[in-house]
Amino acid sequence: MNLLRSFTLSLFLFFSDHCLLITDDCCKANPWQSLKEGDQLASELLKQVDTKKQETGPHPFFARCAPESNLSESELNTQASSLAAKDPVSQMIINSSASRPRIKLDAATDPLFQTAQKVSDTPLTTIGGSETKLTEITQAGQEETLTCEEAGEEAEYTCKSYLLVTLKEDRGPPQQGSLEIPSHTLYDGWRGQNGIIPRNSFDASAQSALKHYISSRIGVPSEQVEVSPPVYSRQVVEYPAKGWTHWYSIYVLPYSYRPLIKVPQFAWDNRCGALEAKADAGGCSYVSKVCTQGPETRLIGGVSVYAPCWEETYTYSCSHPSRNDCGPLRARGCVQMASICKQKVGNACVVYQQTYQCKGEQKTTYSIKGGQTPFCLDGNCRDQSWDSNDELGSALAQLNLLKELQGQFKNPSIFKGDDNYCSKQVLSFKDCCGSLGGWGTDLGLAGCSSQEKLLSQRRKKGLCHFVGTYCAKKVLGQCVTKKSSYCCFGSKLLKVFHEQGRPQIGLGWGEAEFPLCRGFTIEEIQRIDFSKLDLREVFEDLMKTYSPDKLKGTATHLKDRLETIQRGMMPNSKIPSQQRKEG
């Protein structure tokens, strides 16, 4: 758009300046009025750009694969010659070239070259006369104070898990016992009496009778009693009266029973669901699990219950969302002037507001005065300044993307990432995913695998995109091991490119258990609008490697190239060209 505006203004300025050579009426034209009219015309044309783009539509020759792609080189040449003979545009170009007069210019004697050489050697006096002077104007860069937001320390949060005890009635361990019973009580028919069971009988009826007898003696319900056959023990002789002898046998009746007891049932009431969900989303990491009540015995429903721990306290370390937009200011070389805590959790500041002072670059302009120079020769007829912005960072990021693309098109997948996993043990509260909070968090990775330690390092460098968390192992329906998955890339720029480019083409990251870390196809790269990429996250890193000294040789190189071209146009030049020298 700026190019269109400049071109339109140039046309007006050209005709306004050169009309002096045509008519006196034109000489009376006001160059400032011409400038204003050109500016107005440029604005009107710019308003029509979007409408014209919609009317024109996509490029008519754009297709996923051109039909000529399967032709060999000789077939392409043959078809091109055949079509050129019929195409009117091609014929017009050929005829125009054939009918164009051949003019040979002598760079040493031709007035055009001589005048151009004078302009090159002494531009001011040649164009405006001997009274023309060049004045240098230096303007200090404009200072501005800007604020940004940056994540601070990770805050620690605690939650509780309580042991709940309920009592359930159940049969206790077997209790053994026995009763001595005289034969006349045990068996029928002794002295005409009815006993408990018939002699030599131990059927179901006899067992039931014995259970009821034992139940009445020990106070245990008969359905809880198990009996065994009576066992003869000894003979007893009694003399109840003079002349009388009373004798009988003693039997032992073995039995067992399982009394009803109250059995404690244990379950944990975990109040950490919100923090655990945040940990599953990658926002928190495990710090510690500590027993804060116990071991001790408590009276529950009249029953003494012992537990090694009655209360557990879990500690999580969590980051807080912030804009994290200070990187571009540091990349511009701004100086930090102040820092205040914007959000605090306990004693930890989790979000900072940073204040930076940014000084614009010193600008040098030139003003041509005196003589009879054409209007606006120095370009000072309009404001040529610009606002400070991130265009340099954007340009560096885009150039680095193009550099990364070199040699990639021969691969079926461009900017491919790789999947990485880390684990968290729920019961022992061991976290091998770690935190991004600082160097101290690396101590928690001591018992983790080398792959998990490498993932932690890559995450801290900003190379990985979090995909999700899933349960990797269950025991009795409870998740005991969780795993988090990440897609990691070779540079932060490629990671940001994926994060910005995938939403444009509707490409997701897959599932937590099966992350989709593939690269882009060529067709997908073509669908990404690079102008909509927000690459500010990498500006600071790119500016660290950027050096303006790399551009110092550009002007010298261009000057050498121009001299080479000029020498090549001189007739009978005895000076070899620069290319030959270098060769």
Image (cartoon, rainbow, N blue to C red):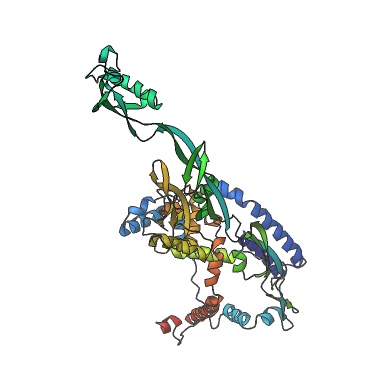
- Residue found 71% across the figure and 57% down from its top: 40
- For the C terminus, the quadrant is bottom left
Give the quadrant of residue 537: bottom right
Question: What is the total number of numbered labels drawn onto the structure image?
Answer: 0
Residue 449, given in percent of the width and then of the height, sits at 38, 60
- For the N terminus, the quadrant is bottom right
Up-down: is 560 above or below 31? below
Identify the residue at the far left of this view: 200
Residue 455, given in percent of the width and then of the height, sits at 43, 60
Up-down: is 3 above or below 509? below
- Residue found 36% across the figure and 27% down from its top: 224
Q: Is residue 399 left or right of residue 324?
A: left
Instruction: Please indicate, yes or no, whether residue 96 appears anywhere in the rendered image.
Output: no
Identify the residue at the far front of this view: 242
Identify the residue at the far top of this view: 192
In the foreground, 408 or 418: 418
In the foreground, 546 or 6: 546
Up-down: is 113 above or below 161? below
Residue 489, given in percent of the width and then of the height, sits at 44, 60
Identify the residue at the far bottom of this view: 574
Q: Is residue 89 left or right of residue 15?
A: left
In the foreground, 240 or 139: 240
Instruction: Please indicate, yes or no, whether residue 533 appears anywhere in the rendered image.
Output: yes
- Residue found 27% across the figure and 12% down from its top: 192
In the foreground, 554 or 71: 554
